[in-house]
Amino acid sequence: MKKDYTILVTRQIPEAGLEILKKNFKNVIVNTKNRNLTHNELIKKVKGVDAILCLLSDKIDSEVISNMDRCKVISNYAVGFNNIDIDEATKHGIIVTNTPGVLTDATADLTWALILAVTRRIVEADKFLRKGKFKGWAPTLLLGTELAGKTLGIIGAGRIGTAVGLRAKGFKMKVLYFNTNRNETLEEEVGAKKVSFETLLKNSDIITIHVPLTPKTKHLIGEKEIKLMKKTSYLINTSRGEVIDEKALIKALKSGRIAGAGLDVFEQEPFVPKELIELDNVVLTPHIGSATVEARTKMAIMAAESIVKVLSGKIPANVVNS
Ligand code: DGY
């Protein structure tokens, strides 16, 4: 029997998730516009709903939350939840959930796609060819950097950081990691070493970021940290843009202070600074870490199931404000 609850889904998600909601609840309101809801639209639409399934790009701040007069659960269609004012939700007795685990492999794969693309100059090479510049094999054409024997530095060895580190074995890389806790999987499987932040910055050839965005991790990498990195190193970010001070990174990339970067996330998405776009030593993707059919489908199912659980009086395992 369908329960008499109203669910707001802020953007079309894979059908598998919507089916779960439609099977369980009488009113499922989906934003079918081909764009995100504006802040004002969110403020209006959250009134009278029992649950909201939202995106990482929906700013669920105190203003939005204070208009949630019946909402029991905010189910974020993402593993990161920095878009939600967690304290405010907790104050209002609203449970917040995310989608951990199901996008780990997709994000780790994209991280490696960026590592390979930037070190082997794939985007530059593709453009070169399409412009008709390929006049035959040449000994020094588009030389890149080899990964074997180099050091991968992982900042944040949680689920995604671990999956990235495990893939390093296939590329014959050494692995360093910076994390609060020891990561036995990485140590046992790839001989990774837990090191200080400074040691990682100084000794890695590729640095990849996998920390959540919190007040502590905002601008974790700035001018000071970049100065510690090798001039030949590359910086990869598939976590959140604000973890890197973008201005400092642009300066470093322009001056050759580091060799390059692979970025899937930006400080003020969807804005991407023109200066980054103009640089050849950067590979840019539009926040597609979890963008596989498999991951997005599992995220939709997990996000919908979280709502079903909470509205049935159960507490899902993936609550972030317990
Ligand atoms: C997440 O789920 O937080 C990812 O950034 C989505 O790509």
Image (spheres, grey):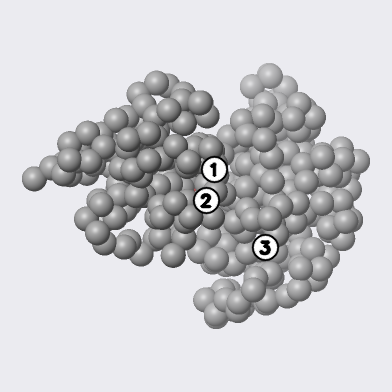
Residue flagged by tag 3: what amino acid is it?
Ile
* Residue 62 numbered mark, or none: 1
In this orientation, which residue lies closer to the viewer: 320 or 167? Answer: 320
Could you tell me which quadrant the C terminus lies in? bottom left
In this orientation, which residue lies closer to the viewer: 307 or 293? Answer: 307
Q: Residue at horizontal 46%, vertical 25%?
A: 41
Could you tell me which quadrant the N terminus lies in? top left
Pointer 1 or 3: first along the chain: 1
Do residues under tags 2 and 1 come within 8 Å of each other at their CB atoms?
yes
Q: Residues within 10 Å of mark 3 (few under 14, many from 20)?
A: many
Of badges 1 and 3, nearer the viewer stands 1
Separation of residues labelled 1 and 3 (CA atoms): 31 Å
Residue 97 visible in the current orientation: no
Q: Residue at horizontal 35%, vertical 24%?
A: 32
Q: Residue at label 3?
A: 155
Q: Which SS class for mark 2?
A: helix
Q: Residue at label 2?
A: 88
Pointer 2 or 1: first along the chain: 1
- From the viewer's perspective, tell me whether residue 111 is left or right of residue 148: left
